[in-house]
Amino acid sequence: MKLLRPISILACCLLAAAGASAQISLTPPAAQAPASKPAAKKETPKESSKETSKPKAPAVAKKPAPTPKPAATPAPSPTPTFDDPNVDLVYGAYQRGLYKTALDLALTRAQYAGDAKAMTMIGELYSGALGVKRDYAKAAEWYQRAADAGDREGMFALAMMRLSGRGGPVNREQAVKLLASAAKLGNPKAAYNLALLYLDGQTLPQDLKRSAELLRLAADAGNPEAQYALATFYKEGTGVPKDVEKSVRLLQAASLADNAEAEVEYAIALYNGTGTPKNQPAAVALLRKAARQNSPIAQNRLAKVLVSGQGTPMDKVEGLKWHIVAKTAGKGDPELDAELSRLSPEDRAKVEDGARKWIGKDVK
């Protein structure tokens, strides 16, 4: 069951905006206290010379005039303050689906703090029509501002827009520069996509060695797509010395990250004992997982082992159900068609019912 899957040339995965590093505290400015007026001084009536013979009334002690209070210092302009650098209200609102709030907070951060992460977030919201009408031109504008401010996620997002022609004309030269800058700053998706351009040989001259180097950078950073692609390089000796064991280790890492293609390849390696000790039960479990992730290849391989009973208890009804599901996706198998034709009417009805439930429509 040898298989080499082609690598997709222009992946359109877009990183949700990375979390910014500061918190906005939108507290209103302190109210300005009115200045107190000095108390007016009371005049003491003068004694008349005609009243000297009269006894004087006892003097009443007068209260001292209140001391004037100093005028309150004018309140500062309502510029937001950024208190806790470990809390990010913008990304927190984004994660909770409060996209309009995320946009308002991000605009404030971009305006008052020059926050590049907030600029990338605004681009993401406009690009994804999240809390605002989709506007690729505005998204590209904000991604450009973020890229100019040094944000690697903004660089990557703008590069993918330039490759696809969204928000402006296709500009492969600018896209390559942006991907190279983002990859240098440690963005694994940028390194992965730049590797694909070197592999494709159309936008850039084909350079398999450079492609492998970039894939290694992304794979070491935990990118499962890069891990799967580099595993294929090691399996075939493309841009690197052929090394089946390294290939299998990379497949294992990518499969742990739920990459369905890697799960299929790693399952095949486990089933055959290629580059790793043979473990057919584990292989069948991985095929089941990938089949449920709608991988037609996994569905076809799972059908074969269930019908044959090799490495797992035989279950023709379940196996042929997956055969029909895979066949609807273009992965037919004449041998399994023959097995299906030999089923009893009762078992065939069970197979078709199971496939119908999975596909959601009649399979006859």
Image (spheres, rainbow, N blue to C red):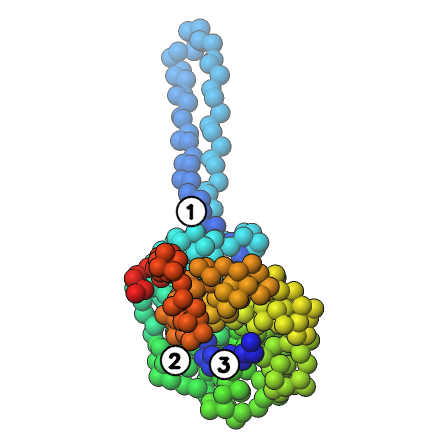
Foreground residue, 139 or 16?
Answer: 16
For the residue labelled by badge 3, is the local secondary structure a helix, a strand or a loop? loop
Foreground residue, 256 or 92?
Answer: 256
Residue 206: x and y, percent? Answer: 54, 92
Q: Amino acid at mark 2?
A: Ser
For the residue labelled by badge 2, is the local secondary structure a helix, a strand or a loop? helix
Q: Which residue lies at the image location 39% right of the left edge and 21% below the top edge? A: 45
Q: Is residue 178 above or below residue 142?
A: below
Q: Is residue 36 above or below residue 215?
A: above
Residue 14: x and y, percent? Answer: 45, 69
Q: Residue under circle 2?
A: 164
Q: Residue under circle 3?
A: 6
| Mark in front: 1 vs 2 | 2
Q: Quadrant of residue 192?
A: bottom right
Q: Is residue 82 visible?
A: no
User: Relative to residue 284, is residue 43 drawn left or right?
Assistant: left
In the rendered image, the quadrant that contains the C terminus is bottom left
Mark 2 is surrounded, within 10 Å at the Cα level, by few (under 14), some (14 to 19) or many (20 or more) other residues, namely some
Mark 3 is surrounded, within 10 Å at the Cα level, by few (under 14), some (14 to 19) or many (20 or more) other residues, namely few
- In primary-sequence order, the first of circles 2 and 3 is 3
* Image disc number at residue 28: 1
Q: Quadrant of residue 48?
A: top left
In the rendered image, the quadrant that contains the N terminus is bottom right
